[in-house]
Image (cartoon, helix red, strand yellow):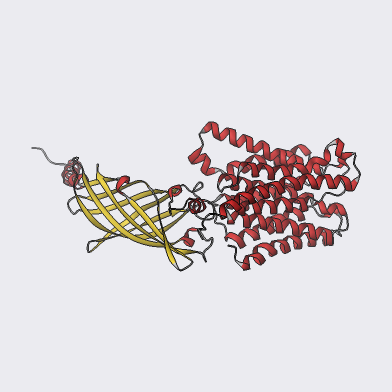
């Protein structure tokens, strides 16, 4: 008769729970940002009279979605500071220089989530925004636009959201009288399941 | 686009602070030239730092931007080696080794983003070596302007520094960087304050030279030129012209200029400094005037 020892019981338990836990890990799907279908648009006040709109290119990004619940759990995206485009070359050049983005010194703008909370269909994504060499916490609210298979056999999910921050919080304090402190960013993106 | 209050806090206060530092030291030392050793160097640090804070706020620690590295690390190190280098009986070899170390360190400290993101190894070596050699040549030139063998008794280096600095500020502004322009004007005020205090409080005309302010002022100027060229829109031509104006201070050590009498020698030196800096300002101004003819974005 074989008497189970404490050691063999532990191994058995590890195997059982390990097998049970495996599907949960496998169900978290990673989505790579499709930069061709990602738009990052911002607006900023001019002299407190009107808004000037601009756009910036996304670099790389990914998000993770828990398959059974279809809940996103992670978001990260980078943006290219030197791609800022407001439709006027001279202004864009100024925005890239040390008075504003200092794009040669800080070429990458990055957001990395630390917590994602589902608030009745709206995702409250809390994370850190690194801009102009300064990293600060930021919460972005995202809503899912849609998901489904594309004509090429891939699977996509898209989100959109709007968020605001003060540029002075990120060390950009120049010309606050002429160019507003509050920047509102509108972002829409989709990711392709890997 | 500068706020009116900045002209006092960023333009006048650095001058008053720098003048106070030099004035106090002159008075403590009885106005002797030899007494104004640490004063000139400390005055550059105090005045420039005040100007930086008044213009762009407190720099964070550790530094994030190259202008932060300039005010938090490079200028204080420049001040330190100026003070250490003035210790009597310190071998000249050691003093020069320290100056060369700082001169060579300016570019890598300020161009970290280029080293991390833009340049490959070969480009990094070429740029850093070139900028390091240029910084050493500029330092040597300033020291030659004070060379005793050149019979220099009147060496208004603080005034020359202020002229080059105001030219740098104007070029930066014309090149579209308000921030770097403000920092250069803060340095101008600082050097102007040092020159004024030296004239008013110092009893010896040699005090006007403020030899101790040369090293830290040069570190600040090189730092601003590097920022202007690599991070803003200052052209290479204007950067070279501004550096040439500093280089021209050493013209007094040339034999042909050495043979001139006192005021003629100073006139030649002043002209040699003024010409390139004026050319840089005019050059940047012409480009700017063409740009403002286009629709304004402000």
Farthest residue in the top direction? B122
User: Considering only vertical position in the picture, is B127 above or below A192?
Assistant: above
Q: In which quarter of the image is residue B100?
A: top right
Q: In which quarter of the image is residue B205?
A: bottom right
User: Considering only vertical position in the picture, is B262 above or below B53?
Assistant: above
Residue B19 seen by the camera = yes
Q: Give residue B288's position: percent from left, percent from top.
A: 60, 52
As drawn, is B265 to the left or to the right of B219? Answer: right
As drawn, is A21 to the left or to the right of B173? Answer: left
As drawn, is B153 to the left or to the right of B129? Answer: right
As drawn, is B187 to the left or to the right of A129? Answer: right
Residue B100 seen by the camera = no
Residue at screen point 58% across, 53% down: B177
Farthest residue in the left direction? A1
Q: Give residue B38's position: percent from left, percent from top.
A: 76, 53
Q: Looking at this view, is A126 or A102 the one in front?
A: A102
Residue at screen point 47% across, 61% down: A169
Q: Give residue A29's position: percent from left, percent from top.
A: 23, 46
Q: Looking at this view, is B217 or B245 the one in front?
A: B245
Q: Give residue A189's position: percent from left, percent from top.
A: 29, 51
Q: Quadrant of the N terminus of chain B?
A: bottom right
Farthest residue in the right direction? B261
How many numbered markers are drawn? 0
Q: In which quarter of the image is residue B254?
A: top right
């Amino acid at each position: 008769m074989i008497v189970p020892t404490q050691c063999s019981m532990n191994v058995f338990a590890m195997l059982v729970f390990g097998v049970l836990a495996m599907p949960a890990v496998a169900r978290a799907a990673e989505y790579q940002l499709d930069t061709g279908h990602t738009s990052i648009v911002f607006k900023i006040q001019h002299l407190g009279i009107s808004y000037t709109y601009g756009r910036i290119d996304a670099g790389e990004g990914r998000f993770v979605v828990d398959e059974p619940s279809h809940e996103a759990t992670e978001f990260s995206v980078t943006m290219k500071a030197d791609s800022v485009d407001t439709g006027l070359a001279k202004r864009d050049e100024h925005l890239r220089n040390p008075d504003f983005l200092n794009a040669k010194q800080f070429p990458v703008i990055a957001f990395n989530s630390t917590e994602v909370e589902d608030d009745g269909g709206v995702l409250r994504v809390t994370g850190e925004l690194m801009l102009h060499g300064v990293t600060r916490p930021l919460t972005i609210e995202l809503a899912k636009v849609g998901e489904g298979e594309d004509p090429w056999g891939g699977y996509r999910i898209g989100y959109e959201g709007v968020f605001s921050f003060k540029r002075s919080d990120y060390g950009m304090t120049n010309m606050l009288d002429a160019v507003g402190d509050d920047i509102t960013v509108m972002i829409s993106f989709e990711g392709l399941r890997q | 686009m500068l706020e009116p209050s900045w002209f006092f806090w960023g333009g006048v206060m650095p001058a008053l602070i720098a003048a106070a530092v030099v004035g106090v030291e002159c008075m403590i030392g009885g106005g002797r030239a030899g007494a104004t050793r640490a004063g000139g160097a400390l005055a550059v640090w105090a005045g420039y730092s005040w100007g930086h804070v008044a213009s762009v706020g407190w720099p964070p620690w550790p530094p994030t931007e190259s202008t932060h590295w300039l005010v938090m690390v490079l200028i204080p190190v420049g001040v330190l080696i100026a003070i250490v280098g003035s210790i009597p009986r310190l071998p000249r070899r050691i003093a020069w080794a320290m100056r060369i170390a700082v001169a060579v360190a300016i570019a890598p400290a300020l161009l970290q983003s280029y080293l991390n993101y833009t340049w490959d190894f070969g480009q990094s070596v070429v740029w850093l070596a070139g900028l390091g050699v240029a910084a050493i040549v500029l330092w040597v030139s300033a020291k030659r302007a004070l060379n005793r063998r050149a019979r220099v008794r009147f060496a208004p280096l603080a005034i020359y520094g202020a002229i080059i600095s105001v030219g740098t500020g104007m070029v930066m502004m014309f090149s579209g960087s308000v921030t770097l322009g403000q920092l250069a004007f803060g340095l101008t005020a600082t050097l102007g304050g040092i020159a004024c205090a030296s004239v008013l409080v110092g009893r010896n005309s040699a005090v006007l030279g403020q030899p101790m302010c040369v090293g830290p002022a040069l570190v600040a100027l090189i730092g601003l030129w590097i920022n202007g060229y690599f991070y803003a829109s200052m052209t290479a031509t204007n950067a070279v012209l501004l550096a040439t104006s500093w280089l021209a201070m050493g013209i007094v050590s040339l034999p042909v200029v050495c043979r001139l009498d006192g005021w003629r020698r100073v006139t030649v030196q002043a002209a040699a400094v003024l010409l390139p800096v004026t050319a840089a300002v005019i050059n940047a101004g012409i480009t700017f005037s063409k740009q403002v003819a286009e629709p304004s974005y402000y």
